[in-house]
Image (cartoon, helix red, strand yellow):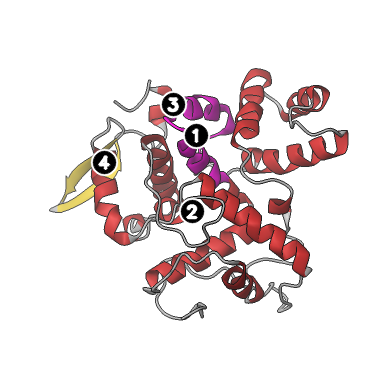
Amino acid sequence: MDSTSGDGDRRVLSLSRHFSKQEVTMDLTRCGLLVTRAEELAQLYGEHGNWNDVKGVWIDERRSGRSTKDSSQDIFRVLTSRLKNAPATLPNASDLPSILDDCATSRDKAQVLSLYLIVDDPLVRYAIHEYIGRLEAGYETPFDFSNETLKKILNRLEYADGSTFDYAESTTERWCEGFRSVLREIGVLENQQAIVGTPPSIGDIPLLVAMGYSYDDSNDDWIEAPRGLLYLLQPENRWEELFDRVAATNAWEFVNLHGDLRLQPISNPYSWVTNGGTE
């Protein structure tokens, strides 16, 4: 098989026809995760407390590392959209400096920031949903991120009005490379040449963020489809191990409720951010 149909009982459904044409952009061609720059923006927001002041500092100091004001503003727009428009189901941007500082590796930081990207960018989220579908359907090579497979997935996208994905070939190919760059940073793809990936290992901090997002984003059945773990492309056969790992921290616990063992935060899903860590 080389494509997904969207049929069948999928935990995370296809997002085709969920978005208007205006919502779907090619912002990923402008910048990927840009972990260092995103972290700088979060730190500036923590210092200044509002995005207008952050923008002034960013543009004045050319924090984006680009040579022109326009390109600097463009990167600022894309990165801040991910942070300031994040739902309450993810940590507030003001908490990100502390969270990212606690990450053990750059990959851990990328995994945290990838959740903000996926939630903010409809096209990235659509593609991730389709790859989750391939994983759930038992494809022999679910994580084939070649241009050929990515284009087939993108070309199946229909907007809410029934029109179809129609970007230029060159733009689509740049988007595909941007998508693969994100996957390299979070550990799905091994190197620049790789186009077939594997589920990445997850660090402690991104695991806590992914679990918090899963818990807050869904209903009582969240554990049947933990959205944060799925967005980090974790197969079901890893979930039990990840649940045990998070329960071993001081932020989560297993609770026996009427004979039913449930996993839940000890306080709120992100209390560990302000309570001095996870040990």
Q: Distance of mark 4 from mark 1, alpha carbons?
A: 21 Å
Q: Which residue is mark 4?
A: 245
Q: Amino acid at mark 4?
A: Arg
Q: Residue at x 32, y 55 (%)?
A: 223
The location of residue 86, given as percent across then percent down, is: 59, 43
Mark 1 or 2: the one toward you: 2
N-terminal of the two: label 4 or label 3? 3
Q: Which residue is mark 3?
A: 102
Q: Which mark is residue 189?
A: 2
N-terminal of the two: label 1 or label 2? 1
Q: Amino acid at mark 3?
A: Asp
Q: Distance of mark 2 from mark 3, alpha carbons?
A: 24 Å
Mark 2 or 3: the one toward you: 2
Q: Which residues are magenta?
A: 90-116
* Tag 1 secondary structure: helix
Q: Observer-nearest residue: 237 or 151?
A: 151
Per the picture, the main secondary structure of the magenta-coloured stretch is helix
